[in-house]
Image (cartoon, helix red, strand yellow):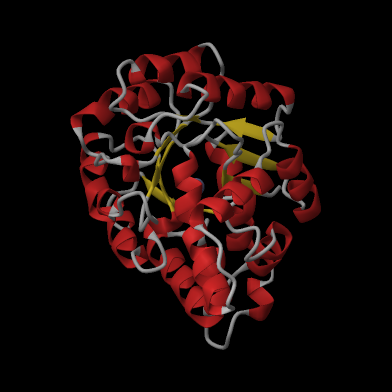
Amino acid sequence: MIIDMHTHLFAAGWVPRSFFHGVARFITHEFAKQGIHQTNEEVGDALLEGSSDPDAAMLLAEMDEAGIDASVIFPVDFGLALGDPDVPIKEVNRLYAELGRRHPGRLIPFAGVDPRRAGAADLFETCVTEWGMRGLKLHPCAGFYPNQKEVYPLLEIAQHNRLPVIIHSGSMMVPLHSKYSQVMHLDDLGVDFPDLPIIAAHAGGMFGYQQMLSLMSIKLNFMADLSAWQVFAQRNYNGFCRALRELLDFTGPERIFFGSDSPSFRSIMSNADWVNLIRDLPQKSPGGIVFKEDEIGLILGGNAQRLLSL
Ligand SMILES: [Zn+2]
């Protein structure tokens, strides 16, 4: 079974446009080198339109192509940082829950809400008890630290309901802030919620994974997903293999999850290629770096299957 621990669905009105205008900077930067001049707004709006997938048709087709059996889907709440989009965050969460109901076993919805919002804990409670959502996603780059007091009531709900929490870690592009998602801010959660499964999305990032590794090696409730590591694998395959091997050596294979962050990296590597790259590690990793088939099985799906009782 192959399970993608980290995906999003975007649509106009679900997420602030300025988020896409920020993402667009990477593209306009490359365009400019080729003499093509477009504004971040033009490119960002086109990007949002091109990745619009309110009924998950694109995601499901991508999963079929890559042989992914199930994907965890979650919204990101950037409203307090960037201005609320047209659709309120409660409704966005409800729409995610509905997609989970429409595609049982294939789309696994987690809730996503900024803990500083009035009624955030109540909303998360509703997501879990009324709408059957299966976990929580937090994006501190909207302007809060994961160990800030507003976050704790939500973590208590997750703990009470035995649900995992996934938290963005590593860096973040304009117009959001990277300081909030540095790995060490997670440490308090390891102390205060030692039995709550906490997944560091992106494993601290390709430049922060060693700090994540140092936390994971001694705080046993910390886990990590490999989403965004497509970039690492593509730019420096040997470095990627070495980093993943280090993660496995010091944390064991049971706490590392396959993830794509789809649709974010579709243009860099297809999910089919990303799955194959991981699956082929035992055969293709460079000399001296050894991966075992059973480790790859756990990363690609075994761990998520166990954690989410799929
Ligand atoms: Zn993400």
Along the viewing direction, whichever of 147 and 21 lies nearer the viewer = 21
Q: Is residue 35 left or right of residue 78?
A: right
Q: Which of the 4 quarters of the picture holds residue 10?
A: top right
Q: Position of residue 259 (x, y in %)?
A: 57, 52
Who's the residue at 41% across and 67% down the image?
206
Q: Residue furthest bottom?
A: 287
Q: Position of residue 137 (x, y in %)?
A: 44, 36
Who's the residue at 63% across and 72% down the image?
281
Q: Is residue 195 visible?
A: yes
Q: Which of the 4 quarters of the picture holds residue 286?
A: bottom right
Name the image quarter holding the C terminus: top right
Q: Residue furthest top?
A: 130
Q: Position of residue 40 (x, y in %)?
A: 50, 56
Along the viewing direction, whichever of 98 and 258 lies nearer the viewer = 98
Q: Is residue 227 left or right of residue 280?
A: left
Q: Is residue 254 visible?
A: no
Along the viewing direction, whichever of 262 and 128 lies nearer the viewer = 262
Q: How many marks?
A: 0
Q: Is residue 105 left or right of residue 145?
A: right
Who's the residue at 79% across and 45% down the image?
61
Who's the residue at 42% across and 34% down the image?
77
In the displayed structure, 108 sits above or below 228; it is: above
